[in-house]
Amino acid sequence: MKTFAQRRGLLVTIDGPAGAGKSTTARALASRLGYAYLDTGALYRAVAWVVQRTGIDCADVKAMEALVSSIDVHVSLEEGVTRTFVDNQEITAHLRSPDISRLASAVAALPHVRDRLLPIQARYSREGGIVAEGRDMGTRVFPEADVKFFLEADLETRTIRRYQETVRAGHPETQGDIRRAIQERDANDRSRATAPLKPAADAVVIDSSSLTVDQVVENMMAWIPGHS
């Protein structure tokens, strides 16, 4: 691992459950630091997109293993945006529908998918200067990260935030459906055998329920060496 002095910047991770504000906060923090923003969830959404298009059953272990072994999934970090590609086709615009979100949850619970995507994610730690957000960044993907955060919020706050996101994206759902989907995602993420959702032992836990994005970022900045 590179030392702080050898890197061009620190490696910062933000983990947390659905709707806690990870993506918005990570983008804002990356912008504040002048770092790249890495949305690792986009990789799982990309696999879900392929699964949806091919009609493969996620429960078919051999088919899923063959699928993730045969496709080239990667992201490009440019100007604060994580652009996502499958076999050199950009699919960024297709990854935020409710159907893809639900399928990504099932895909992310599969150990062979997580194992396949682990080295793809880990390669982005080599140069530093990155804010990476996901659900196992500080515990499994980047255990050597310089600063780790775990962002949480109460269920009702997360439901409202996710509802507002779906409206902006043009895929509105009822708040009841969204609440149930978040509860299901929480259960899946926290109970999966491989890299369950939980704060890293050395993570700073922040409850964003009553905080604005700017307030969360200010809180995080106080924990980042050289920026307090």
Image (spheres, grey):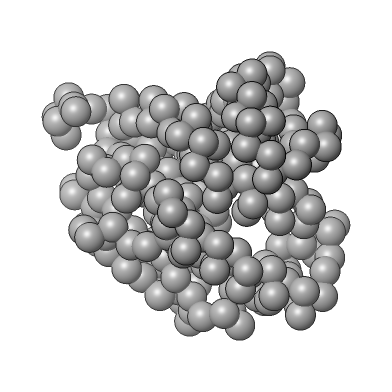
**Residue 110 sits in quarter:** top right
Whole-percent x and y of residue 224? 24, 52
Q: Residue at x 59, y 22 (%)?
A: 69
- The picture places residue 117, in percent across and down from the top left corner, at 50, 32
Closer to the camera in the image, 176 or 67 = 67
Q: Give coordinates of residue 123: x percent, y percent.
A: 39, 25
At a point 62% along the width and 45% down the height, the residue shown is: 107
Q: Is residue 155 above or below residue 100?
A: below
Q: Residue at x 49, y 42 (%)?
A: 111
Image quadrant assignment for residue 174: bottom right
Using the image, determine if residue 100 lies above or below residue 179. above
Q: Residue at x 14, y 30 (%)?
A: 3
Q: Quadrant of residue 152?
A: bottom left
Q: Is residue 128 left or right of residue 192?
A: left
Q: Residue 190: where, in percent of width, then height?
A: 46, 64
Quarter of the image with the N terminus in it: top left
